[in-house]
Image: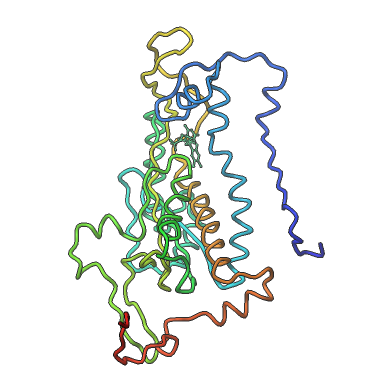
Amino acid sequence: MEGVTIGAPLAFQIENRDHLKWRGKQVEPFTTPRPGHADLSGAIKYGYRDLRPALERASARETSARVAVGAVCKHFLAQFGVRIGGYVVSIAEVQAELGEMPFAERFERAEASEVRCPVVQSSTAMAERIRRAMEERDTLGGVVEVIALGLPPGLGSYVQWDRRLEGRLGAAALSVPAVKGVEIGPAFANTRLAGTQVHDAIRLEGEELVRPTDRAGGLEGGVTNGAPLVVRAAMKPIATTLTPQQTVDLASGVETPTRYERSDFCPVPRAVVIVETMMAFILADALLEKLGGDSLGEMLPRFAALRRLRLADLPMDGEPHIFWPD
Ligand SMILES: Cc1cc2nc3c(=O)[nH]c(=O)nc-3n(C[C@H](O)[C@H](O)[C@H](O)COP(=O)(O)O)c2cc1C
């Protein structure tokens, strides 16, 4: 009312134009599960006579509703100066070299790229690689990177396993269809280095604690540390390939090649906004936990009063004391 939510559900309707095509028509049953899709899982789990309900329900079209809701979460976070953006870092073997490019510039450049990659030459190479996969009647996966900028330190917790932000963000990213791996910052690359090369030094600049590097990806002990929060998600090459794969027709019990369903070749660029959305859900929740409150009027002053990375905010006097008195 008057441009402000009043606690009633916000409703979105996204029309699926495909629906009309199906109305009142008799269709051939779909009984040949595609390896790597949810077809066989659906048949086992729900006992369908036709795989269609499984493949329609498991379709990533469902994520358009998530993205709509994610826009609300992003808007909420923006009131506190938090911005979430993302881009593609690799498709198949084509890897973008991002170097020291600032995050805001990466977001902007990704917006201008048809494959959502901030590096122009890599974008061209990725688009070319996707065209080749289409000619080869195949599909491709890749890696997306999503960043949250402007987060205050202190969101999340280590006091219970289910409050660690790594776990919450990881689960949220893995809920995106075809995402099979997640890392916080360069987690897998860090495993190839020694501890002294991995951890982000704590330095003092005036009264301010600063972290010159961000190999932790913005999280230490399940808690934001004030550095950019970096989540990377690995998406597999999708299951529906123009080149048939081996399967079994569940109706006839005969081994057969898969049947093609209209499909993408490489939805990696479109997964970026979905992973952004999932991150926005979790971070909006974590911020609400931290600030409580029922209105921005309550939350904004609390946000301004949060403990920051200033020595003066940390109540340590260096005095000896007894933890467990007799
Ligand atoms: C944006 C997006 C688009 C997708 N498009 C397709 C598609 O066209 N064809 C396909 O087979 N899978 C597609 N997928 C992947 C399937 O939804 C996913 O593989 C399927 O639900 C099985 O789940 P799983 O791969 O997580 O095990 C897409 C995923 C995303 C995120």
Q: Residue furthest right?
A: 2
Rendered location of residue 251, percent (x, y): 48, 10
Query: Where 292 falls versus 274 (above or below)?
Result: below
> Total of numbered circles in the picture?
0
Quarter of the image with the N terminus is bottom right
How was the colour assigned to the protein in this rendering? rainbow
Residue positioned 48% across, 74% down in the render: 152
Dividing the picture into quarters, in which one does residue 100 lie?
bottom left
Query: Where 36 falls versus 64 (above or below)?
Result: above
Q: Residue furthest left?
A: 194
Pick the front one: 184 or 92: 184
Dividing the picture into quarters, in which one does residue 160 lie?
bottom left
Residue 153 left/right relative to 129 = right
Pick the front one: 195 or 17: 195
Residue positioned 30% across, 85% down in the render: 322
Rendered location of residue 64, percent (x, y): 60, 45
Rendered location of residue 57, percent (x, y): 57, 32
Pick the front one: 238 or 176: 176
Residue positioned 36% across, 92% down in the render: 317
Rendered location of residue 49, percent (x, y): 55, 15
Query: Where 320 falls versus 238 (above or below)?
Result: below
Query: Where 257 falls versus 121 (above or below)?
Result: above
Residue positioned 41% across, 37% down in the render: 131
Quarter of the image with the C terminus is bottom left
Pick the front one: 39 or 142: 39
Residue 12 left/right relative to 123 = right
